Amino acid sequence: MNAIPILFEDGEALVIDKPAGLPIERPRAGGLSLEAHLEDLKLGFQRAPVPVHRIDTDTSGCLLLARNPKALKRFNAAFEARTVDKIYLGIVAGPVGDDAGTIELALTKISSAEKGWRMIAAKKGKPSITHWRKVQDHGSLTLVEFRPETGRTHQIRVHAAETFGEALLGDPVYGSGSGAARTMLHALALTVPREGKAAVTARAPIPADFAALGFGDVDACT
């Protein structure tokens, strides 16, 4: 089992660079998950760290873990208060006309026997806000920076598909699923403010599959 890269570490927090394809919770059908790595991530501490938030199985990049119950409570409060700064990079499977904007679409969950469950835009859904900026074009693909203000399930994926008329590349739920082996979304950076001490800050390297599509040299743009 390969070691998971650590991007930030102190007495109450870890930020790891979660690999794409690794689920946070153990799948019902079995198989590896982040849970299998938690003992290794103790790093000399008595308790195993606990994930503070969720990112999709396909999504790579920054994931915050708390090392004790008090830290977990404080970090959860920061997410609920929307004081956490999250930056994602996504590859949109088509051109993006504007340079930047803010998406405000309420989201709700639906389910059907044919398609399973998914999130859709709905007036009676939960308010969802994503700020975005076009970073780079490469052929027919567009690299977009997303800064979600809220943290709804699949928020960036739905907002991208609804706003740009094209889903994220490789997205099997909101797009065609073609063009990539996974939904091309990467949690690039995370900043979590803390009272009385320096913020938790981390930045995850651009993953190899982004680089293979021509988006490996974007650090100067983000």
Image (cartoon, rainbow, N blue to C red):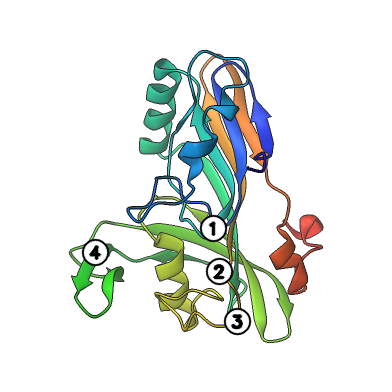
Instruction: Write down the quadrant of residue 141 in the picture.
Output: bottom right
Q: How crowded is mark 4: few (under 14 residues within 10 Å), some or many (20 or more)?
A: some
The Cα–Cα distance between marks 4 and 2, rounded to whole angstroms, is 22 Å
Which kind of residue does numbered mark 1 sit on?
Gly
The Cα–Cα distance between marks 1 and 4, rounded to whole angstroms, is 23 Å
Rendered-image quadrant of the N terminus: top right
What number is the disc on residue 152?
Answer: none
Secondary structure at badge 4 equals strand
Q: Which residue is painted at 40% across and 61% down in the image?
A: 155
Tell me which label, 2 or 1, sits earlier in the chain. Answer: 1
Residue 165 in the image: state x and y as whole percent: 46, 84
Which mark is in front, 3 or 1? 1
Mark 4, residue position: 109
Residue 27 in the image: state x and y as whole percent: 38, 52
Mark 2, residue position: 182
Mark 3, residue position: 179
Which kind of residue does numbered mark 3 sit on?
Gly
Q: How crowded is mark 3: few (under 14 residues within 10 Å), some or many (20 or more)?
A: some
Q: Nearer the viewer, residue 156 or 61?
A: 61
What number is the disc on residue 21?
Answer: 1
Secondary structure at badge 1 equals loop
Secondary structure at badge 2 equals loop
